[in-house]
Amino acid sequence: MANAQHSPPLLPDNPVIKSGSLGFKKHRKNNWARGFFILSSQGLNYTKMATSNSYPGTLSKKILDVDYLSCTDEPTTTIYPYEFMIKTLNKQYYFLAEDDTEKNKWLDSFKMATHQAKRIKCDPPLLPGQDPPSIVAFVNVKSGGQQGRSIMESLKICLGKDNVFDLSQGGPVVGLEQSYKNYGGDFKIMICGGDGTVGWVLQCLDDLHYPVVPQVGILPLGTGNDLARTLGWGPGYTSQELPPIIDLFYKATPVRIDRWMVQIISGRDPENIRSIIVNNYFSIGADAEIALEFHQSREKNPFMFKNRVLNKGIYGGIGAKNILFGKDSLSPCLCSAIVVNIDGAVIELAFHIKGLIFLNVPSYGGGVDLWNIEGDQGKFKRPELNDRLLEVIGSSGAFHLGCTQMKLSHGERLGQGSVFRINFLTDQAVAMQADGEPWVQERATVIIFHLNQAEMLMNRA
């Protein structure tokens, strides 16, 4: 057995956290071997004396990385009371200490090594004495064709079981209250779900009124994932390894995004006011009709909507059906149904406009750039995430929206503003949607104004 003086030198920024003798086995068979181990933030190395005359000294082999692991101090057998297990994403490692005190020292050291590894990965790296913020995950287990349910256990290994919350068990408030109790406001939030899930968690953060609000990143599990696309988290999670994604959360850039309040005042009862918070977009007319039909189909036949690709195919099929069977031509021309006021000025709606979309982010319907943000902006300002402006787009119907999905066209720019008022001219009901949640709206007055800003995490990698 090698002594500590034979340990290979380590760099100053990779100090030894603990070293010593341990029993070791990779699997649960009782073929224990004893060896000398060195633990640092870079991993656990098995070290032994070299047997070759050409290399005097020691040989070292890395057993495991310590970026994301979990420890248990519960004995895994009744024969070896000082046994403990280290679990990574894909493997379990079993160690045997000489006594209970030594076992607890190793467990504490593994936790410290994991902590230091996360601190080093922050961009920029944290200084000595600074603690890395914990990442707390909120998982919608129903999102992405049950993807959320399948990643729960892996997230618990990476982040710790106390930092992963199933939103079907009490919603976001349970996890937020527990996390504030554990960390104050010093943690980052990972929302595992679609745009609707993101809005749900952000609204709960509003309602709790905490003085320090954590930054929010997204692991996209929904269908469109427009906010996740805008913030650089991609079109959707496709079963990649989780540790590299978690590393990106430590390196992500904080950005602020506008959030908007939509108030709908009933035309029959002015005291009846419905309030909706919008993060991505709000729309009236043609595109909301497609979203409504999709929503109704999903409610009626949930077994058909099992994954993101299938969902998008069904959504596109509804739009195509509306075109082929003439339903698109029956959508009301909005110029005879509503009057739109932007910052005190009425805008004229052409006869062909059958849909209005109020954009807060430059991604719509699963990645479509309706505004043509990279094109010539003409008389308008280039849209930004925190400019306190909404962009207003006109659509001539399902066929036009289909062309935008195929990148053959853009929307029709109608205006930009910060306060909007929409008055119904008739009693005809109109389809509306907010961030993908559609409904049929009877006669009303709709007012849209800036609510606040959320601090999100943008992945620039």
Image: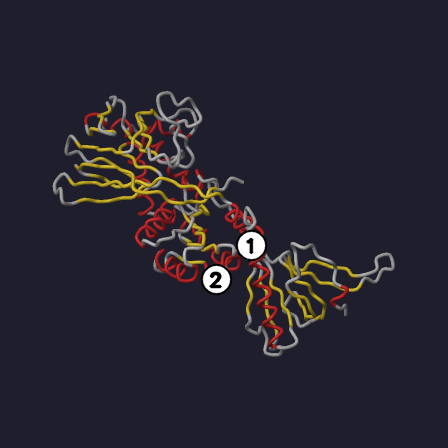
Can you say whether 367 is above or below 95 in the image?
above
What x and y, as percent, mark residue 104? Answer: 58, 72
Extreme residue in the left direction: 268
Location of residue 449 by image quarter: top left
Location of residue 311 by image quarter: top left
Label 2's element? helix
Mark whose residue sits in front, 1 or 2: 1
In the displayed structure, does residue 312 sit left or right of residue 153? left
Extreme residue in the right direction: 53
Give the residue displayed 46% in from the left and 47% down from the top.
219
In this figure, what is the number of numbered marks? 2
What x and y, as percent, mark residue 421? Answer: 22, 33
In the image, what residue type sits under mark 2?
Lys
Can you say whether 342 is above or below 173 in the image?
above
What x and y, as percent, mark residue 70? Answer: 55, 63
How far apart, in angstroms, are the residues tagged by discs 1 and 2? 17 Å
Q: Earlier in the sequence, mark 1 or mark 2?
A: 1
Q: How many other residues sit within 10 Å of disc 2, few (<14), some (14-19) or many (≥20)?
A: some
Quarter of the C terminus within the rendering: top right
Residue, disc 2: 161
In the image, what residue type sits under mark 1?
Lys
Give the residue displayed 40% in from the left and 24% down from the top.
409
Can you say whether 240 is above or below 348 in the image?
below
How are the colours assigned in the image?
secondary structure
Residue, disc 1: 118
Quarter of the N terminus within the rendering: bottom right
